[in-house]
Each structure stands twice: as structure tokens, then as C-alpha cells.
Amino acid sequence: MTATTVIDGVEIPEFLIALEAQNHPSLSVIEARRAAGKALAVRALLLHRADELGLRPAPEHDEAGREETAEEALIRAVLDEEVDIETPSTELCRHIYDSQRSRFTSPALVEAAHILIAPQGDEASHWEAAHMTALDVTRTLIEQPGQFAALAKSLSNCPSGEVGGSLGQLGPGDVVGEIEQALSALQPGQVLNQPVRSRFGWHVLKLDRRIEGRELPFDYVEDKIRLHLESRAWTAAATRYVADLAERARGLGVAFSLTRDGRFDTGALSLGERLAGASAAGLEAWLDASDPDLAERVRAAAAAAGIDVDTFVQRAVKDFVNTAGDESWTHLISAAQGAEDPAIAAIASLLRTRLTPKTRTYTIFRKV
């Protein structure tokens, strides 16, 4: 018997959730399992829909030349087929541009120079020696900044030393993060009062010039704005589409089950369909043999409602299918597993829940 959990109308073996959870790092096991179950359910719903549509897409390649898997191709195809959005108009793009102009600027640039003092080996002593040299150079340049080019040419272990240590114009991401952060705190003409370490060695830094970003014209950014709006709208539409698939699956009770290899089982009836087709007569005989007390409670409840047992059971099943959440379906499937007639076992379980008196609470003390 395989333990299962129902998520968005999809019955998923627990061991598949445990395997998928490894792909969803989280602060807790519960959160990782929840994300894993959701991912498996969404994938199953999309693959099931692709099968309904009869899609047979050829795998495509991404910019790096990697080929889609067959499942990735099916998911892409079903979303391409059924998720549609309107192309943002020029007027909307212009409104975004006019209301958020500060976002549409060229990146700030800096002109900087450095002197690299590289360690002569990987040992800590070599790094310490290089650090001491870099500190001496820094102290000299704070007092005599005009010597920067000469010291760079004589001491720097970087080819830039031949041009006085100049790094030219730098934009975001052009140098390692440690150096970029240090340069951002300097004023033009200033030498940093401490050398900065990177994987290459110790850097003595000087900022020569800062060039602030300039506002970009609308014609230059219109396509980028449109692409951003399309991407955001498509993500929202795809999320709604998947939610609709899940709602439809939940409306069927359990739309389908995943097999041990993670595929959906298209041949089996959903549990909701099996519940609807179960025989009340068979249920009464089963209850009389296995749980006489429940059988009597069902007959008594039907009589109290003024209806026959068959109608009572049908109403109970319909109410369950229409209102039950994933947790209730999970419990019901657990009750049905291993039974000779899973539908009858499931109905018996939901009837027990329905006919169990709710626990009453009492107030012992009342505030005056």
C-alpha cells in the first residue's frame, strides 16, 4: 500500500513528494513538502490538459543550446495554446514611462584606477605580506595622490599598471563586487584609505570620475517596457489558468492519480466518479457485515430526514464531493486503500465522519 496525498485534485504518492522536496530548499520540511506537492500537482494538471488537447510538440532549444524534455515541451505547448494576453499599447507603455521616468536611465559609470598587490603564493603568510605592502602604498598615496600612476607602473601585478593603473570606464558588474562597492563610497580624486581584498590579491583604489546615469528617451525603452508588461501579464494569466485547472480537478473530487513513475493514470476513474456510481444496496450489505452500528445510524439518519437510504447516501456523497478540500480527500483515499471495493469503503468513511456527533464544549466559569 502506497501512502498518498491529494493536492489540487491530484492524488500523489508520498515518496514522489519526498523526492521532489529536494528541489525546493526551504526553512522547514513542511514548507519544502508543500512546495514540492504543489509543483507536482501543477505539472500533472498541465500534462493532463496537454493530453486532452492531443498536443504533440517537438522539443525546442534554449539560448544555450539545451533541448527541452518531452514534458517541458508539452507544458510549454499547452500554455502557448491556452494562455493568451493582449499586447500592451504604446499609450500604456508611454504612461508607464512618464510616471516612472527615474527608472529609465542609463547606468551610472565610474572612471577608476587600482594597484594590484598579488600574493606570491596561497599561504596565509604570502597574503599577509601582500597586505602589508598594499597598506604602505595606500599610506603613501593618501599623502601624495599624484604618485598613483608611477607606483602603479612599478608595483601593480595587473596589466593596467602600464597605463597608470587605469581601469577605464566601469559600469555595474564590470569589476568584482568588493571593488564596485568600495568605489561607490569614494569621491572623485579620492584614494581609499584601506586596501580591498579580492580573489586576485589586494587592491589600492582611486576614483577619478563619476558619470551619473542619463534619462533614456521613450523610443529607446518602449520595447523593454512592453516586454516587461507582457511578461508580468503572462505570468498572471498562467497563474489564473493553472488555478482554473485545479478548480476543475477539485470539482471532480480526485481528477486522476500519479503512478509510481510520476505519470498520470488516464485509465482509472476518478474517486469522485466511483463514489457517484456506488450502489447503496451494496453499501447496506457491506455495512451490515462489517459495521452494524454504522448501518443502524445510517438508517436512522435517513428515516429522520424522511428519505430512503439510497437518497441519503447520494446526498452525502454529493455534499462531500462539492465541499471537501484536499485534506478530506486524502483521508478518504487512505480509508479506501486496500479495500475490495474502494468506493464503498470511502463512502463508509465519509458517512462515519458525517454521522459522528460534534464534540460539545461547556463553559465551567462565566465572568460576571
Image: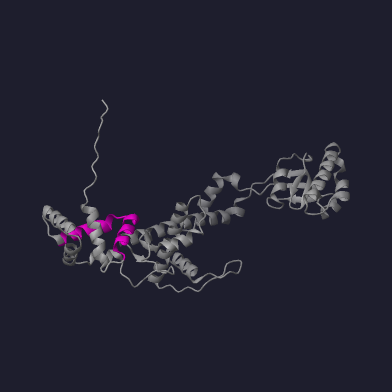
Chosen colour scheme: one colour
- Of residue 36 and residue 218, the one placed in the foreground of this image is 36
Q: Quick check: 172 left or right of 48? A: right
Q: Quick check: 58 left or right of 136? A: left
Could you tell me which quadrant the C terminus lies in?
top left
> Which residues lie in the magenta part?
310-337
Image spot of residue 26 (x, y percent): 51, 52
Could you tell me which quadrant the N terminus lies in?
bottom left
Q: Residue furthest top?
A: 368
Specify the quadrant of the image occupied by residue 67: bottom right
Residue 365, above or below 12: above
- Of residue 31 and residue 90, the one placed in the foreground of this image is 31
Q: Residue at x 59, y 46 (%)?
A: 103
Residue 147, above or below 71: above
Residue 29, above or below 273: above
Judged by its main secondary structure, the magenta piece is helix
Q: Residue at x 25, y 29 (%)?
A: 366
- Of residue 350 and residue 362, the one placed in the foreground of this image is 362
Residue 178, above or below 50: above
Q: Residue at x 87, y 50 (%)?
A: 153
Regarding residue 83, the answer to whether it shows in the image is: no
Image spot of residue 308 (x, y percent): 12, 60
- Of residue 346 and residue 288, the one placed in the foreground of this image is 288
Q: Quick check: 123 left or right of 51? A: right
Regarding residue 163, the answer to whether it shows in the image is: yes
Q: Say if the magenta span includes residue 306.
A: no
Image spot of residue 217 (x, y percent): 62, 50
Q: Say if the magenta span includes residue 319.
A: yes
Image spot of residue 312 (x, y percent): 17, 58
Q: Quick check: 281 left or right of 45? A: left
